[in-house]
Amino acid sequence: MFRQGFFQRGKFDSGMDDSIGGRINLKRLFGYLKPYRAQIILSLFISFVVTGLNLIPPRIIGIIVDKAIVGGMTAGLVQMAFFLLAVYIFAGVFTGWKIFLLGRIGQKVTYDLWQEVYRNLQRLSFSFYDENQTGNIMSRITSDVVAVERVIVDGVDVFIIACLTLLGISGVLFSMNWRLALVTLIPIPVLVVLAWLITIKAHSIYRQVRRKMGEISALLQDSISGIREIRSFVREDYEINRLAEKSMEYMNTNIQAIKLWAVFFPAILIATSMGTFLVILVGGSMTAHGMSAGRIVSFLFYLGLFYQPIHQLNNVNHMLQHARASSERIFEIIDAVPQVKEEPGAFDLRKPVRGEVVFHNVRFSYKPGIEVLHGISFESHPGEIIALVGPTGAGKTTIISLIPRFYDVDSGTVFIDGIDIRRYRLKSLRENIGIVMQEPFLFNGSIMENIAYGRLDATMDEIVEAAKLANAHNFISALPDGYAHQIGERGIRLSVGEKQRIAIARAILKNPPILILDEATSSVDNETEALIQEAIGHLLRNRTSFVIAHRLSTVMNADKILVVNQGMIAEVGTHDQLIERGGFYANLYEIQWKNRKAIG
């Protein structure tokens, strides 16, 4: 049960109607070609030229057969051969031009899709990422977009050429011999029925294929991110088996699709072969009634060209079912609506921001019906240090997450400077709030780039000054490349304390009027803690600060301590006031004091 459920969280499942949803998505998908109408029209023109050129060789070959081979007239044979060569060369040149044009269009559409998907991902609320696995999202951005790009480039090209070829060759066949042309159409109803059946069946299979691929991507992303935990718990074999299970599911789903096409494609070949058989049978009898051998040869060449686009259209149908399933997954992200939205008429925080934060009877739940905050009310004055303490899971991080509107309250109100934060523009609100988390996230890049993330236009002198205030300058200078040192993914090449100081430097550089610190010293040694506490002292100056702390010794000097327990504020006061009351806080403090004495 554990193994089945461990990686099931966060899977998209639109529950769309296969046929209706597919039509809507494809219509919308090809709408991405609109900005490139001029290039599409040019490609259509080139396709028309290529189709016309491809119709010429069979007729020339027929003439050569009648005049040179059967009739023995070699005059003009060389000229016709060179003319045939010229047709092939021109067709090749135009085809290459068309491939380049369509390939470039495909890359531009891929770029547009990536930008739109990523832009919406940046807008979505934290609840979206709480519910969906990173690897699954990555699968949609990468493999699903590539599948869509393939049908836009290759599919459109093949579809256009195939349709034009069918129309052109049909005209030629009927002009050569309408009776024989009618014989070639006999397999068409069978082909239409087969295509209809395959379309109905294939789409549902490919939706499963894309979903299974997303699950594999999610598992790989988690496994690679947690490689140290895997090694430390010696779970390599367990992880290999988990991937084997997911890969087996993916393989079996793909095999279903392969079986489908393994039956379908031979059926197409047999049907078209029957057409060729009938033409040879009927055409052979027509030679006795004045139809030349060369004309029969030309007709058979055209017949090969006639059935070839039918096979190509079935290949397009194959790609189309992939693209339908992928486009649904892509549009699920593009159409996802952020839960936290700006109200109409939202405005910026008024300058200067004083930093007065008030919670009034705030209730909140991550999932409907499971409330985690129950009527939270408190106020902080500008420049105060507000500490939040309490047991793990009490709701401290949830409270501070409501200040920058990472989530919206169910009821009640959060005010900044006397105004409901829902009336502020999100960008303005978050620009005025700095956050240093317990496990700060650092980007794969240099130390300088990570500190400058606090203010992208900062000068090098400002970056260095922020690092000095964060007690980070000395260890940075000791590195081989100094501020240009590459820290690796998630700052893996730095210690926990070093990462914390980089994060503090980033917040100092941002210089926000409101600051949130989520237990910035919980995982470091005493010496590093002293350095971080000194850096935090610089950071806390002249701003309203909210500090989550498990070590009560770090918040003894706070202006106000909120004791949070089971989603409610159990006590409020200064350290001395709370100790004097002898309540929940005093009990926590006594337990920690005894533990410190025992360790000492």
Image (tube, grey):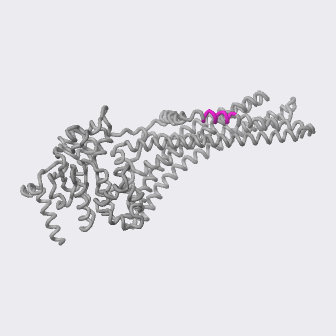
At which x and y percent is residue 357? Answer: 20, 44
Q: Quadrant of residue 59?
A: top right
Closest to the observer: 83 or 240? 83
Residue 30 is inside the magenta segment: no
Q: Would residue 566 appear left or right of 433 to someone viewing this image?
A: left
Closest to the observer: 71 or 576? 576
Q: Is residue 592 above or below residue 144?
A: below
Q: Tell me the quadrant of the picture where the N terminus can be found.
A: bottom left
Magenta residue span: 39-48
Give the main secondary structure, helix, strand or loop, of the magenta stretch.
helix
Q: Tell me the quadrant of the picture where the C terminus can be found.
A: bottom left
Residue appearing at x 41%, y 41% in the figure? 120
Residue appearing at x 43%, y 48% in the figure? 137
At which x and y percent is residue 398? Answer: 25, 48
At which x and y percent is residue 485? Answer: 41, 62
At which x and y percent is residue 27? Answer: 52, 33
Q: Is residue 171 above or below residue 229?
A: above
Q: Is residue 406 visible?
A: no
Q: Would residue 570 appear left or right of 350 to someone viewing this image?
A: left
Q: Would residue 352 appear left or right of 278 to someone viewing this image?
A: left
Q: Is residue 349 above or below residue 439?
A: above
Residue appearing at x 34%, y 43% in the figure? 125
Residue appearing at x 32%, y 66% in the figure? 474
Q: Is residue 211 visible?
A: yes
Closest to the observer: 212 or 349? 349
